[in-house]
């Protein structure tokens, strides 16, 4: 098997869609020797900010000298982004080997209970992190939490960044229902740290923490960075990223007795954190600035808008916008379109893309003075905006990944974004009681 064949095998697992429940993952992990039992985790759930918070935690603990695994999703371009050790992507040869080792195990499952793509990748990552002798793994949920494949671990701490409406067709149509799914990562006696602040959301998290006798630490939006951060200059701009940093530091503080981190390591970790595609600024040789941000839901769009108004108040902006049909793209347009003088809407490289003409119409409804064009492709939009001083590419992580790829800023030799696609599945069974 070569790497492209391993990727094709993983792509074929999309046929099994996305399923909720831990049975398959627990069974496959047991067949693989239960690698999760030999690792330490920080488990991170939430609607937005999961990846950024994970990146900050990874950077801080790596600065202490630990060997740190990082498991995140989706990837921007390369599948290998999902599994990293000390921010080094899993090598292609290791992907091939691990796929080959898991294939005989997968044949032991009945066809109607075959593990999904995400379940297989979860166990693949656990095997790799164990083999790499990681001291700590920063472990991001895929979708939800309670029945997410990542929830087979017992972490040192659980983290819930925030709760907003997203993935309602899978997680529930209210923030309370979504909070109940995310709070499913809370384990008995294990501390949980959250930056969620809506009363109805906090009530759900507090109830679950009480039932599990889990210490709960709340980080308020008004929280300042602790003294341990000193005057660290956070490379990720925006108040939402400062809140993510405060959350990460609250986790570090809660775990000081188990995983000590010095003030210099904390500062170094924050100052060197990297998280592509989230408020990522690219400056081209001619001076043009391109800001990439995968604001793929309404809460993300509002955070981007606030950051743009705060840091780029007087800038004449061009917006390149693409979104997925199953997101609240109308409200994303309503949030971002008023900020731009020129807007190009484009299809996203996904079978779930929203129509560019419909995006353009939604933008016109809230910004009648802007020049608004529905384009055929991202490449066309980037070409037509090449002379603009400041371009914001947003609305979907797919679009951000395609932009990084087009600029040659991705480690991938070919796009593997299609691996992010997954089929529909029924809403998970409700939580009783």
Image (spheres, grey):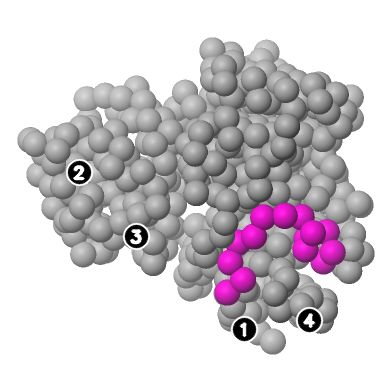
Give the residue number, with chain letter if any, for mark 4. 107
What label sits on residue 426 in the rendered view?
none
The answer to whether 260 appears left or right of 8 in the picture is: right
The image quadrant where one finds the C terminus is top right
**At which x and y percent is residue 16?**
62, 71
Of the numbered discs 1 and 3, the one sitting upstream in the chain is: 1
Q: What element carries label 1?
A: helix
The answer to whether 355 appears left or right of 218 in the picture is: left
Q: Distance between the residues labelled 2 and 3?
A: 15 Å
**At which x and y percent is residue 65?**
80, 40
Give the residue number, with chain letter if any, for mark 2. 362
Q: Distance between the residues labelled 1 and 3?
A: 27 Å
Q: How far apart are marks 3 and 4 (CA)?
A: 34 Å
Of the numbered discs 1 and 2, the one sitting upstream in the chain is: 1
User: Residue 281 or 370: which is nearer the viewer?
Assistant: 370
Magenta stretch: give its range.
15-28
**At which x and y percent is residue 240?**
49, 27
Q: Distance between the residues labelled 1 and 4?
A: 18 Å
Query: In this rendering, does residue 192 appear at all?
Result: yes
Q: Is residue 101 magenta?
A: no
**At which x and y percent is residue 398?**
42, 57
Q: Which residue is drawn at 82% across and 66% down?
A: 28
Q: Nearer the viewer, mark 1 or mark 2?
A: 2
């Amino acid at each position: 098997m070569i790497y492209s064949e391993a990727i094709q095998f993983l792509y074929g697992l999309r046929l099994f869609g996305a399923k909720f429940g831990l049975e398959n993952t627990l069974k496959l992990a047991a067949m693989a020797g239960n690698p999760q039992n030999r690792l330490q985790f920080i488990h991170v759930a939430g609607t937005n900010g999961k990846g950024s918070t994970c990146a900050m935690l990874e950077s801080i603990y790596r600065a202490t000298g630990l060997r740190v695994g990082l498991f995140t999703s989706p990837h921007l371009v390369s599948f290998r982004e999902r599994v990293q050790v000390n921010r080094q992507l899993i090598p292609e040869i290791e992907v091939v080997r691990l796929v080959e080792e898991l294939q005989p195990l997968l044949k032991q499952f009945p066809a109607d209970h075959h593990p999904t793509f995400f379940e297989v990748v979860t166990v693949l990552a656990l095997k790799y992190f164990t083999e790499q002798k990681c001291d700590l793994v920063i472990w991001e949920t895929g979708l939800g939490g309670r029945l997410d494949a990542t929830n087979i671990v017992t972490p040192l701490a659980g983290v819930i960044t925030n709760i907003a409406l997203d993935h309602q067709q899978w997680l529930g149509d209210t923030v309370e229902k979504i909070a109940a799914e995310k709070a499913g990562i809370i384990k008995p006696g294990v501390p949980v740290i959250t930056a969620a602040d809506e009363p109805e959301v906090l009530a759900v998290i507090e109830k679950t923490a009480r039932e599990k006798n889990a210490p709960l630490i709340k980080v308020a939006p008004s929280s300042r960075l602790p003294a341990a951060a000193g005057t660290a200059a956070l490379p990720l701009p925006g108040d939402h990223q400062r809140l993510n940093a405060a959350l990460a530091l609250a986790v570090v503080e809660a775990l000081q007795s188990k995983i000590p981190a010095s003030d210099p390591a904390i500062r170094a970790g924050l100052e060197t954190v990297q998280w592509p595609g989230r408020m990522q600024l690219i400056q081209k040789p001619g001076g043009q600035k391109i800001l990439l941000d995968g604001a793929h839901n309404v809460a993300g769009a509002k955070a981007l808008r606030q950051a743009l108004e705060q840091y780029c108040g007087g800038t004449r902006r061009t917006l390149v916008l693409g979104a997925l049909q199953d997101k609240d793209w109308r409200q994303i347009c309503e949030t971002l379109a008023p900020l731009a003088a020129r807007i190009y809407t484009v299809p996203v490289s996904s079978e779930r893309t929203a129509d560019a003409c419909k995006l353009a119409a939604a933008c016109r409804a809230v910004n009648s003075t802007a020049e608004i064009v529905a384009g055929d492709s991202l490449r066309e939009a980037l070409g037509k905006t090449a002379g603009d001083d400041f371009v914001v590419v947003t609305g979907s992580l797919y679009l951000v990944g395609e932009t990084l790829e087009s600029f040659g800023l991705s480690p991938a030799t070919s796009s593997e974004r299609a691996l992010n696609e997954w089929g529909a599945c029924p809403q998970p069974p409700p939580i009783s009681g």
